[in-house]
Structure formats: structure tokens, C-alpha cells
Amino acid sequence: MIARHFTRPARGAGVELGVGDDCTLLTPTPGHQLAVSVDTSVADVHFPREAPARAIGHRALAVSLSDLAAMGASPRWCLMALTLDHADDAWLAPFAGGFDALCARARIDLVGGDVTRGTLAVSVTVHGEIPTGEALTRHGARDGDLLAVTGHLGGGAGGLAAWQSGERSLADPLLAAYLLPEPRLDAGQALRGLASAAIDVSDGLLADLHHLCDASGLGVDLDPEALPLAEGLVERLGEGARHAALTGGDDYELLVGLPPAALEPAREALDALGVPLTVIGRFTAAPGIRGVEATGPGGWQHFSGATP
């Protein structure tokens, strides 16, 4: 199974020994730090079990790559632990195809992993590189920095609602945003040296903004009216569109702090990539998030099982 579906020639340098041994042997680039992250995607928790296999493969890698994007890292290698309730080549072929297609676009190599039997789940560990000292982190924001977000918000929540209402066509922009998210890798690298802090929006804007504020020891004046809403979100959710953008999660955009002087250079850098950048608030020394009615961080929390 591994040889048939998951063994590919290495695309990049640094893979001394890849799939097929007890460990992979990797050589990082001199003068760089390794950025390593792992995410697990579980059927009917993170994605619908009946979703297209190709989309499940893409999505499992994309959500892990988004963590590298938030650090400004360049992707290099990944590992996958795949749990299947049964082996089915008709499902595995498109799953592996979706995973490998994103590997190719992201210039990352699958260098090892594991396959076991059980409830369908995919764990992906990604390795990226950052020039030493240039990583974006959550704790660098300063009083007076602007709060900005890439792309559009609410697509993940809108796409889940579309799936739950019976939509199955990936031509629907909301469903595509949910099942085929695009990690902002190039944007994260372009923001190195410009952004003061960054996080990816995975659990919901408010939840991840709380993480950013807590790490930086700051508060935020948030402008909910400035939120860039995903295409079709208002039509799908009506008055609930803005709430979905605030708390829905699964958007995988980058939420960043920017010194005011860095705003235009950042916009120019992202314009060149075709990625919009929208200012939605400002960091302040006073703690708390102002501008929304919220008693907690909002967003997805696995062990409460619900969003507010």
C-alpha cells in the first residue's frame, strides 16, 4: 500500500533517506532553524467522512502547512500517519493524489509515516525552514500595531453549512473553502521582517486573536464591520455571516500584527501574490478584545464540542 500510493521521488534537496526505512534521514539548510508542527484530522470531526477522498488528502496536508505559513517558514518535508477502517485502493488513489498534488505545489516531500487500522484519521507532521532569527511568532505584537488579516473570513463555516444543507459541488466557493483550504505559505514568507506577530486562523478569528493577545500581553480594538467576508457567505448565512467570520474557524488565513509603517510594504508584497490584506483593528496596552460582545474566546474547542 505504501509503495503503491505514497512513495515518490524526492522533489527537493536534503532527503538522504526517505520512505521505506525505520527513520528518514534529513539534512537541514545551514543557517536555518527548523519549524515543526503536527495536526490530526479525524473523520466527522474535522471533515465529513463522505467528502471526496482527494479533498480529504489535500485538506489533511493543508491544515498542517498553514502552521508553517504562520511562522513564515518554507516547507521542506512531511510525515503522515494514516488510520483506515479498511484498505480500499479506489479510495486511497484519489486520497494520495490530493495529498501529493498539494505536496508538489508547496514544494514539500513526503518522507515517511505509518499506516494502521482503526477509525479514519490522518496525522500530518510538517517540517519547514526559516533563516535563523526571522520566524514570525505570536508574542511580538506591540501597543499601537495594526491588526490585519489575509484573504477572507467565514468560508470554512459557510462551507460546512453548505455541506450540511446537501451541497456537494466543489464549484461552490464556500464548500471549496472548507474542503480545499489554501495555506498562505507565500504570504507568510513575504511578511517576514514586516509583521510583528502572526497566527493562522484555524479555530476561529476570536479564539486565535485571544491567543495572539495573550502571547503578546496586549488587547485589541476590533472593528467587526471591517472583516473581509468570504464570497457567498452573506447569501448563505444572512445575518449570521459576521458571527461565522468571527467564530467559525477553518479559514486558515493569517492574522498578523503590523507596525503602521509596515502596512504599505506588506500590502505591496501580498498584492504581488494576489492576496488581499485587510486592517481590522489595532493592538492596545489595555487588555481584552473590544468591539464585539463576547464573554470568552469563542471558536472551536475540542473538549467542549461546540462553538458559541
Image (spheres, rainbow, N blue to C red):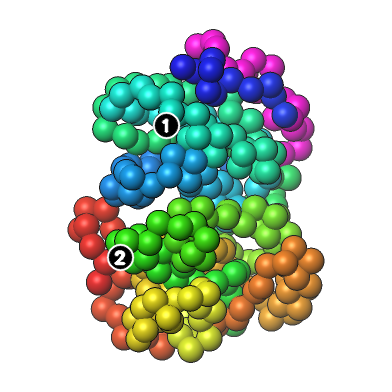
User: Residue flagged by tag 2: what amino acid is it?
Assistant: Ser
Residue 29: within the magenta?
yes
Q: Position of residue 277 (x, y in %)?
A: 65, 74
In terms of depth relative to the viewer, which is nearer, 71 or 53? 53
In terms of depth relative to the viewer, which is nearer, 255 or 5? 5
Within 10 Å of the Cα at label 1, are there few (<14), some (14-19), or many (20+) other Cα atoms?
A: few
Side of 186 relative to 181 (left or right): right
How many numbered circles are shown? 2
User: What is the secondary structure assignment of the residue under circle 1?
Assistant: helix
For the C terminus, the quadrant is bottom left
Side of 143 relative to 174 (left or right): right
Side of 150 relative to 52 (left or right): right
Residue 189 is at least partly visible in this image? yes
Q: Position of residue 47 (x, y in %)?
A: 36, 49
In terms of depth relative to the viewer, which is nearer, 91 or 33? 91
Residue 211 is at least partly visible in this image? no
User: What is the secondary structure assignment of the residue under circle 2?
Assistant: loop
Q: Position of residue 70 (x, y in %)?
A: 57, 56
Task: Give the quarter of the image for residue 142.
Answer: bottom right
Q: Position of residue 103 (x, y in %)?
A: 62, 38
Q: Residue at x 45, y 53 (%)?
A: 179
Q: Residue at x 58, y 20 (%)?
A: 7
Q: Which residues are magenta?
A: 12-33
Task: Give the quarter of the image for residue 15.
Answer: top right
Q: Residue at x 30, y 80 (%)?
A: 294
The main secondary structure of the magenta stretch is: loop
Q: CA distance from mark 1 to mark 2?
A: 24 Å
User: Residue flagged by tag 1: what amino acid is it?
Assistant: Trp
Residue 94: within the magenta?
no
Residue holding disc 1? 91
Which of the numbered marks, if any, corresponds to residue 165? Answer: 2
